[in-house]
Amino acid sequence: MDMLVDCTEFEKIISLQIDGEATESERQALEEHLSVCQNCPKTYRIFNRIKQVIRSRRTDFKPSSNYCSTVLNQLGPIDQPAIRTRSSNSKYRH
């Protein structure tokens, strides 16, 4: 198999591995490929670093109760369908 095509396929497996979704056979194939490929170990390190950075920047964002209306007001007038809300008697109203 052409190395570029082979590496392209292994990039998908690298992503699966980093996300914890690779199968046992995929993990084994990846381990073997990483031992002989010059490019994919670097790709693996880059993908892994990207995931680490994303995790470190993740926050527990909790929007305020008026967050949606504030964002919509900042967007200005837009054509949108009527938003239905529940009234106290459980019937929908516009």
Image (cartoon, helix red, strand yellow):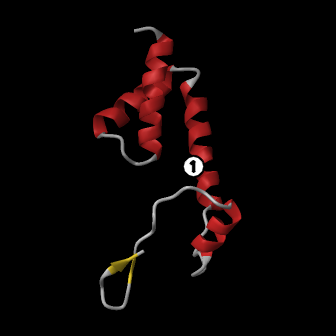
Rendered position, 76 above or below 25? below
Can you tell which quarter of the image residue 12 is in? top left
x%, y% of residue 6? 44, 17
Q: Is residue 61 visible?
A: no
Quadrant in which the N terminus appears: top left
Give the SS element for disc 1.
helix
The residue lying at 58 percent from left, 20 percent from top is: 38
Above or below, 56 against 49 in this view is: below
Left or right, 74 with respect to 9, comes to right
Residue placed under numbered mark 1 in the picture:
51
Q: What type is the residue that disc 1 sits on?
A: Lys
- Choose between 44 and 51: the one closer to the eye: 51
In x, y percent, where is residue 15?
47, 38
* Mark 1 nearby-residue class (10 Å; few <14, some 14–19, many ≥20): some
User: Residue 93 location, x and y as percent?
Assistant: 38, 78
Up-down relation of residue 89 to residue 71 (above or below): below
Q: Residue furthest top?
A: 2
Which sits in the foreground, 54 or 71?
A: 71
What residue is drawn where x is 40% and y is 72%?
Answer: 84
Residue at image coords 62%, 38%: 46
Question: Residue 2 falls in which quadrant of the image?
Answer: top left
Report how many numbered discs are placed on residues in the image. Answer: 1
Say which quarter of the image contains residue 89.
Answer: bottom left
Query: Which quadrant holds the C terminus?
Result: bottom left
Q: Nearer the viewer, residue 83 or 25?
A: 83
Q: Percent x, y for residue 14?
A: 46, 35
Question: Can residue 51 be seen from the camera position used here?
Answer: yes
Q: Is residue 4 above or below residue 52?
A: above
**Image-based side of 32 in relation to 48, left or right:** left
